[in-house]
Image (spheres, helix red, strand yellow):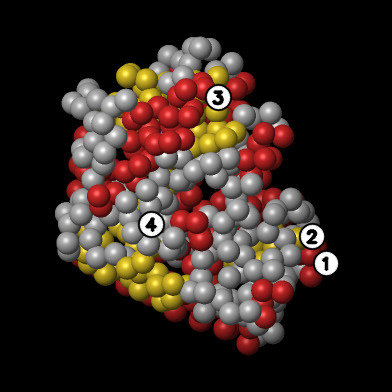
């Protein structure tokens, strides 16, 4: 077995953090204070509404040295990702199609064959892996929550476990080394960065590649997306910060792609071994980050001012709608909705419910903090609200035509990147 040690600062401690989680620099700038907030995916049951609710500081910080945006308070991972954690990736067709395409492009780029093993970490219900499986590649999922059971029942072999060095060892013994390890929407969340990276190093073949997809700092900043800041997202990576991270290991960031999931994401390809040939896409994106001001504090100050003004504008609009006696409700309850509604201060008197898909595991629950009920979207047809606020606004182009096709005549409200009112006839 290789040497499996890692820098101490890559075990992010629970509680208050004073140094950069990536590069260990001392100086972190406070960009935006979103107040004390509850965990966005700890939805409440009706009974829980009678109990105290825990909140934690939620502050957006920025490291001037490696440009990583991060929180300075870390809630313990076992509290954030409780066994009943509601997210399930197979729930939306666009996401399933998108993940299938990731597989096809990886098979092609890395000339994968049927004897190769693809491991997905944080594999949810196995949506991504089913793309590999369809092409005959050997697959294995690693998923800590009970969603692993759904995956196994659907024929996607999944280990219900967190991913660490011990898990990597267990997998290696039983299945052999992996050619490709993927993880989507996971790498920005974990405390055990060092343990995770060394587990990957241990499990990958010598020419193996690790592909991590997360939301992307440049999109967050340019899109005014303060609502991507929540406790699950311990870090919001720039490419520069990812390079700084993997420079501390026997890995090279060899390729990068940008995509439009989660309102803008980055997919980095990290190859085992130092000094590997690097795609010009990496150099190009690093230059773009610099040009876009990701290296300058002023850029982040501007971002914070934009968030403050988006809040005032939205609340002004909401109050005017309420005063005029018209009805306004919310659509969707993604994690980011909790940040936005808690920061803005929108409760159930101002927004009586959040409508969700009939298949959502969130139905019957309540938004943490503001306790807005999450209901089956069928209610929209009965209520015919004057306005529908799209809280999954990054999918507005998909959601608006769907709601219109259901027979709704409501006006749509897109809260970010800037407040936009879309008449039904414009959809
Ligand atoms: Zn740093």
User: Which corner quadrant of the image does residue 418 belong to?
Assistant: bottom left
Give me the residue at 32% from left, 19% from top: 206
> Could one spot residue 223 in this view of the protein?
no
Q: Residue furthest bottom?
A: 323
Name the residue tied to disc 2: 378
User: Which corner quadrant of the image does residue 286 belong to?
Assistant: top left
Residue 383 locus on image (x, y percent): 79, 70
Q: Residue furthest right?
A: 382
Dot 1: what SS? helix
Name the residue tied to disc 4: 234
Give me the residue at 18% from left, 26% from top: 275
Mark whose residue sits in front, 4 or 1: 4
- Label 2 and label 3: CA atoms lie apart by 37 Å
Dot 4: what SS? loop
Name the residue tied to disc 1: 382
User: Which corner quadrant of the image does residue 124 belong to?
Assistant: top right
93 relative position to 71: left or right: right
Q: Are marks 2 and 1 in contact (CB under 8 Å)?
A: yes
Position of 279 relative to 8 (above/below)? above
Dot 3: what SS? strand
- Label 4 and label 1: CA atoms lie apart by 40 Å
Does label 4 or label 2 sit earlier along the sequence?
4
Q: Are marks 4 and 2 in contact (CB under 8 Å)?
A: no
- Label 1 and label 3: CA atoms lie apart by 45 Å
Position of 298 relative to 214 (above/below)? below
Does label 1 or label 3 sit earlier along the sequence?
3
- Label 3 and label 4: CA atoms lie apart by 29 Å
Q: Quadrant of the N terminus?
A: top left
Does label 2 or label 3 sit earlier along the sequence?
3
């Amino acid at each position: 077995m290789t040497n499996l040690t890692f820098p101490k600062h890559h075990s992010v401690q629970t509680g208050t953090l004073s140094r950069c989680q990536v590069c260990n620099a001392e100086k972190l700038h406070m960009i935006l204070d979103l107040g004390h907030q509850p965990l966005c995916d700890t939805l409440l049951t009706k009974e829980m509404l009678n109990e105290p609710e825990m909140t934690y500081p939620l502050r957006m910080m920025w490291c001037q040295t490696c440009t990583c945006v991060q929180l300075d308070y870390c809630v313990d991972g076992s509290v954030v990702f409780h066994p009943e954690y509601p997210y399930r990736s197979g729930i939306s067709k666009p996401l399933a199609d998108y993940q299938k395409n990731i597989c096809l492009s990886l098979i092609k780029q890395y000339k994968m064959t049927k004897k190769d093993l693809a491991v997905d970490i944080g594999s949810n219900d196995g949506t991504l892996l089913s793309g590999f499986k369809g092409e005959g590649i050997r697959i294995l999922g690693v998923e800590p929550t009970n969603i692993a059971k759904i995956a196994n029942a659907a024929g996607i072999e999944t280990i219900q476990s967190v991913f660490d060095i011990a898990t990597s060892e267990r997998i290696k013994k039983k299945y052999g080394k992996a050619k490709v390890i993927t993880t989507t929407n996971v790498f920005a969340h974990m405390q055990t960065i060092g343990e995770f990276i060394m587990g990957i190093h241990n499990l990958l073949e010598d020419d193996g590649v690790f592909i991590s997809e997360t939301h992307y700092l440049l999109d967050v900043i340019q899109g005014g997306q303060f609502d991507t800041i929540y406790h699950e997202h311990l870090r919001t990576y720039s490419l520069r910060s990812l390079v700084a991270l993997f420079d501390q290991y026997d890995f090279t960031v060899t390729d990068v792609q940008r995509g439009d999931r989660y309102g803008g994401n980055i997919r980095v390809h990290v190859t085992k071994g130092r000094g590997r040939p690097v795609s010009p896409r990496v150099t190009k994106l690093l230059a773009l980050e610099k040009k876009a001001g990701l290296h300058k504090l002023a850029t982040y100050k501007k971002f914070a001012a934009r968030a403050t003004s988006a809040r005032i504008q939205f609340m002004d609009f909401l109050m005017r709608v309420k005063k005029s006696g018209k009805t306004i409700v919310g659509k969707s309850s993604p994690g980011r909705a909790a940040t936005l509604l808690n920061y803005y201060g929108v409760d159930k008197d101002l927004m009586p419910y959040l409508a969700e898909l009939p298949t959502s595991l969130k139905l019957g629950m309540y938004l943490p903090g503001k306790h807005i009920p999450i209901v089956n979207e069928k209610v929209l047809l009965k209520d015919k609200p004057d306005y529908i606020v799209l809280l999954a606004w990054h999918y507005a182009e998909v959601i608006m035509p769907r709601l219109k096709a259901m027979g709704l005549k409501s006006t749509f409200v897109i809260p970010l990147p800037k407040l936009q009112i879309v008449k039904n006839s414009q959809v």
